[in-house]
Amino acid sequence: MFPAVSGMHADELMTSLEQALVKLRQTWPAPWPGLTWVFEQCWARLGYAPQGLGERTQALLAFAQRAARHIEEDGRQRASLGKEPAYHNRLHMADALACMTHLLLAQRMQNPPAVAAPHQEALALVVMLGHDFMHPGGNNAFPMQLERMAVEALTPIMHACGLHESDRQAITHCILMTDPSSVKPAHLAVAGRAFSLEDLDWMSVLAQEADILASTLPKTQQALTESLSSEWQHTNPEAAAKLLLPTSRLMFLEHAALFSSPAAQYLGLNEIKSRQINALQPHL
């Protein structure tokens, strides 16, 4: 799924991410390899040896295996009934995993860590794997409604895999913070604060960035916008139609697609946004 990362510069890492997103689309919806495979590929890309991982990291990886199976089963069942959301589906979770993997790699390049951080990086991937589990499509009727559904579905699996209480709390916090209404406050909260994966506020921001990164990139944004519009069509056709307008794209780029992490700066994501904003101006 991924080319080798050793010695990659920012533009090469961005190309790697775009290639990963394209490859995922070449398999969707068939021959879909499954989220277990996608997670394993992402973890392998981070380059940790199987031996030497701490108990908490091993528990997170066991949780990822079990959660991925549950998410796949749910997705396949809903797909067979024509009820899997057009956007908030297994492909989106795979996109988010690939995006988080590349943000983690970019963070290493931008500011090489003094020591390896397998526990924190496994936690970041686990959040993206499960953040939209059980998503029915559409939007929250009240803050964090659908994100709480994901947490509630994942909680028994977290307990079954023996996750440490602080890891359960971290996963819960970061998933809840993927509610779009939490994005701007989260970025404001970390402004001027040194980045650390051990800082849950920063971990939440990184999860928010991974969540919307594929929808920000020029090569994937149009199809994803159309998928989200299709998802909204049954419950809010007026909003679904407006979503395809240049004004809605501009609003997304300016107010929802926020990038504050050092990894995002390294990848030039705000510059990618700015070019799109400038290109939209003549169409407004």
Image (cartoon, grey):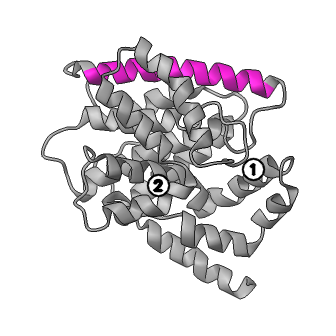
Q: Which mark is residue 55?
A: none
Q: Describe the element under mark 1 as helix, strand or loop.
A: helix
Residue 109 is situated, as x and y percent measured from the top left of the image, at: 26, 54
Tag 2 or tag 1, which sits nearer the N-term? 2
Amino acid under disc 1: Ser
Residue under circle 1? 227
Q: Is residue 170 above or below residue 196?
A: above
Residue 232 falls left or right of residue 251 = right
Q: Residues within 10 Å of mark 2 (few under 14, many from 20)?
A: many
Residue 64 falls left or right of residue 52 = right
Residue 206 is situated, as x and y percent measured from the top left of the image, at: 40, 51
Residue 64 is situated, as x and y percent measured from the top left of the image, at: 45, 24
How far separated are the C-alphas under marks 1 and 2?
A: 19 Å
Amino acid under disc 2: Glu
Residue 91 magenta-drawn? Answer: no
Q: Nearer the viewer, residue 136 or 69?
A: 136
The stretch of residues the image draws in magenta is: 56-79
Residue visible at 36% across and 36% down in the picture: 170
Q: Which mark is residue 209?
A: 2
Q: Is residue 223 above or below residue 84?
A: below
Residue 155 falls left or right of residue 34 = left
Q: Give the main secondary structure, helix, strand or loop, of the magenta stretch.
A: helix
- The image quadrant where one finds the C terminus is bottom right
Residue 11 visible, this orientation: no
